[in-house]
Image (tube, coloured by chain):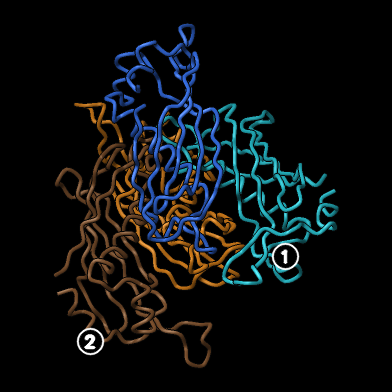
Chain colours: A cyan, B blue, C brown, D orange
């Protein structure tokens, strides 16, 4: 299973008065890592649009468990892999490691979308082509 | 059940090239609304520290389902209430309404914490005093 | 001279480990207030596009002087006015007041832009119509 | 003159509906690069506190000129150097290069601070020791 390792340095502005990472930042890093995972297999969003008419992989659900705090200067790794493929959606699992230990665990569920035939200004969920999951094997 | 209604205007910088709110922002608004909910019952964090020795209500879990996108200029409301009290944790449920319709649903689980007696530089989960949940009835 | 007063509550996530506002946030609030100023005179960006073919008022310069820090829970006001009109640019002056005292002073210079006739995918600076400054008198 | 080169990848969430970097992010990258510059000469903030009693290098002024936009996926470099030393302040000049071309130019003025002797809860500007500028030669 293809796993992307997204290296993130925790900067001063990412932390709060409790001197730990302000938690919405983890979701920002999840989002970055999900895109970089697709890029890493040659399926960046422009390619998806051109080849499959995909209009983005919008998020429908995101969750995180915060196990241990990270602090200014910490160098963390977001490990991301697609752990589940449904008909029109898929689940990206993210694990944040800090000094080798699990700091945050989470996932995002994203949808494969296309323009609606009756109204191209709108999008709808569409079946994920069978060759796509194989690229991530 | 006490419910706090946090009014949020979606600004240009909150939205992304798809012209919808970049999703980590919703968690930032959840965090704001959770604090404002405690403030609204007279239990802001300074009061909690002074009266109960509480060292913050750190988050251990957060989740959101994204039902409909919000856009630049939308005026949304984050409705927040504590829907579950456990021994040392509680769950804040957040519902984002956009033009009266559910746009996002989510929750945060937060912990009641105190300084550790053996090492005051560290914190530990502590039992929530029984009078606290009643304040939110 | 039309002045817009943008009320901003400083949230926990806006502040850093020094317990003061992380300074890039002030520029985010400047940007919000500049747009709200245009909205307040009935010239929101959609109207500018429709009526004048304007493709946005992109920023070319921004500056701030930080006089006094603001902290979690502070309720500040960003007062914004257009203090100078040039042929194709204008200057928005922003003053942040905290408890009535000047906390930050700054400005943004923005450009009036149109699509280029030879290449509509690109934009160019264009003369500001003479009736525009009068709206802000 | 010591120059720090801070490599930044422009992520989706850094850009706005105009598909360019939302400008306050540049100041966030300036702030990161200023700190990394001090780290790179062995004078991180903890060392400054321990060795000189310095309580941070708070910002008093920041400015940027936006020459060319940057977009999602661009890999930019923030080049930072201290270009001026005053008695109690110094100026960090930042140049953002995108594909080798100047995209943004700016500076930050920061203050050397110590705790006030009459009230250690407050800080005051203090003279920069003469050996400090030499470290950046």
Taking A77 as reference, is A45 above or below it?
A: below
**Callout count:** 2
**Residue at 70 percent of width and 40 percent of height:** A93
Query: Is residue B124 visible to us here?
Result: no
Which residue is at the front of the view, A79 or D70?
A: A79
Closest to the observer: D33 or B110?
B110
Please identify the quarter of the rendering in which residue C4 is found. Answer: bottom left
Is residue A92 shown to the viewer in this render? yes
Judged left or right of residue A94, residue D106 is: left
Residue C85 in picture, x, y percent from top left:
23, 78
| The image quarter in which residue D111 lies | top left
- Left/right placement of residue A36 relative to residue A9 reads right
Eye-nearest disc, 1 or 2: 1
The residue carrying mark 1 is A48
In the rendered view, tell whether residue A18 sits above or below residue B54. Answer: below
Q: Quadrant of the N terminus of chain B?
A: top left
Residue D50 or C21: which is nearer the viewer? C21
Q: Which residue is mark 2?
A: C130
Q: Are marks 1 and 2 in contact (CB under 8 Å)?
A: no
In the displayed structure, would residue D72 be above or below residue D115? below
Instruction: Judge by depth and name the residue closer to the eye, D58 or B130.
Output: B130
Tell me the CA gap for discs 1 and 2: 46 Å
């Amino acid at each position: 299973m293809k796993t992307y390792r997204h290296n993130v340095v925790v900067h001063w502005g990412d932390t709060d008065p409790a001197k730990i990472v302000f938690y919405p930042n983890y979701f920002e890093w999840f989002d970055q890592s999900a895109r970089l995972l697709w890029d890493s297999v040659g399926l960046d969003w422009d390619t998806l649009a051109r080849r499959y008419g995909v209009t983005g992989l919008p998020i429908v659900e995101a969750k995180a468990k915060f196990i241990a705090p990270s602090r200014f200067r910490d160098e963390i790794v977001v490990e991301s892999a697609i752990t589940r493929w449904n008909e029109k959606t898929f689940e990206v699992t993210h694990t944040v490691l800090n000094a080798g230990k699990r700091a945050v665990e989470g996932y995002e569920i994203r949808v494969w979308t296309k323009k609606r035939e009756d109204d191209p200004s709108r999008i709808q969920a569409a079946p994920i082509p069978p060759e796509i999951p194989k690229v991530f094997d």
